[in-house]
Image (tube, helix red, strand yellow):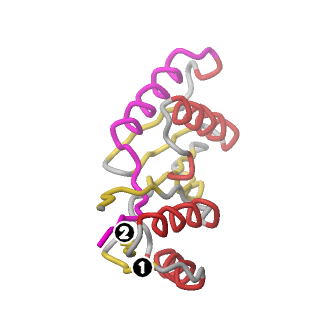
């Protein structure tokens, strides 16, 4: 029976490259000379550091531009709150989304069920498997998900015929 998996996975290698390019640009830009502006990555957490919230916004903008150049969707970034860390320095932790949360998986499952397509959706961990009798029905389900789910970048893999 044909099937595919709906997933939300960022290319972590490209994310790491974008963070490194951001750090390189911060080191060479004149307006960041002598400041504590920096960007670091550990696992799936990116830490942005700066002297003020304005500078933090500039670092975030550079990161978004580098991500876009590397074909990484910026919707993968889950921005945390701005935290003060000693003196006038601030930091923000940005999490890289990986996997579909259970609430969104239930929304996807409900969307497919309400669409009256002849396919079934099953939640499997952090992915949603969609199965159907015909390949055309599966492609219609993919089109529906691309159109309706806009808050996270969904991709489809493991397409079996």
The relative height of residue 76 versus residue 150 in the rendered view (above or below) is: above
Residue 67 vs residue 120, the one in the foreground: 120
Other residues around mark 1 within 10 Å, as few (<14) / some (14–19) / many (≥20): many
Classify the position of the C terminus by image quarter: bottom left
In the image: residue 146, left or right of residue 40: right
- Magenta residues, as a range? 1-30
Instruction: Identify the residue under disc 1.
Output: 121
- Total of numbered circles in the picture? 2
Other residues around mark 2 within 10 Å, as few (<14) / some (14–19) / many (≥20): many
* Residue 148 marker: none
Dominant SS of magenta comes to helix
Rendered location of residue 130, percent (x, y)? 40, 73
In the image: residue 52, left or right of residue 110: right
Residue 10 vs residue 110, the one in the foreground: 110
Q: Secondary structure at mark 2?
A: strand
Residue 21 vs residue 133, the one in the foreground: 133
Find out whether residue 15 is within the magenta segment: yes
Residue appearing at x 41%, y 49% in the figure: 10
Residues at marks 2 and 1 touching, judged by CB atoms closer than 8 Å? no
The relative height of residue 54 versus residue 10 in the rendered view (above or below) is: above
Instruction: Identify the residue under disc 2.
Output: 127
In the picture as drawn, the residue positioned furthest to the right comes out as 54
Q: What is the CA distance from the residue labelled 2 to the residue labelled 1? A: 10 Å
């Amino acid at each position: 029976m044909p099937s595919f998996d709906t997933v939300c996975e960022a290319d972590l290698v490209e994310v790491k490259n974008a963070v490194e390019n951001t750090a390189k640009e911060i080191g060479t830009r004149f307006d960041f000379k002598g400041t504590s502006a920096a960007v670091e990555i550990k696992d799936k957490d990116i830490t942005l550091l700066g002297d003020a919230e304005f500078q933090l916004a500039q670092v975030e903008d550079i990161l978004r531009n580098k991500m876009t150049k590397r074909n990484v969707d910026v919707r993968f970034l889950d921005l945390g709150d701005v935290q003060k860390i000693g003196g006038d320095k601030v930091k923000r932790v940005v999490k890289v989304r990986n996997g579909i949360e259970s609430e969104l998986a239930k929304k996807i499952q409900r969307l497919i069920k309400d669409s009256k397509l002849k396919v079934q959706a099953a939640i499997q961990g952090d992915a949603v498997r969609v199965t159907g009798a015909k390949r055309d029905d599966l492609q219609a389900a993919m089109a529906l998900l691309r159109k309706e789910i806009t808050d996270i970048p969904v991709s489809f893999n493991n397409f079996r015929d």
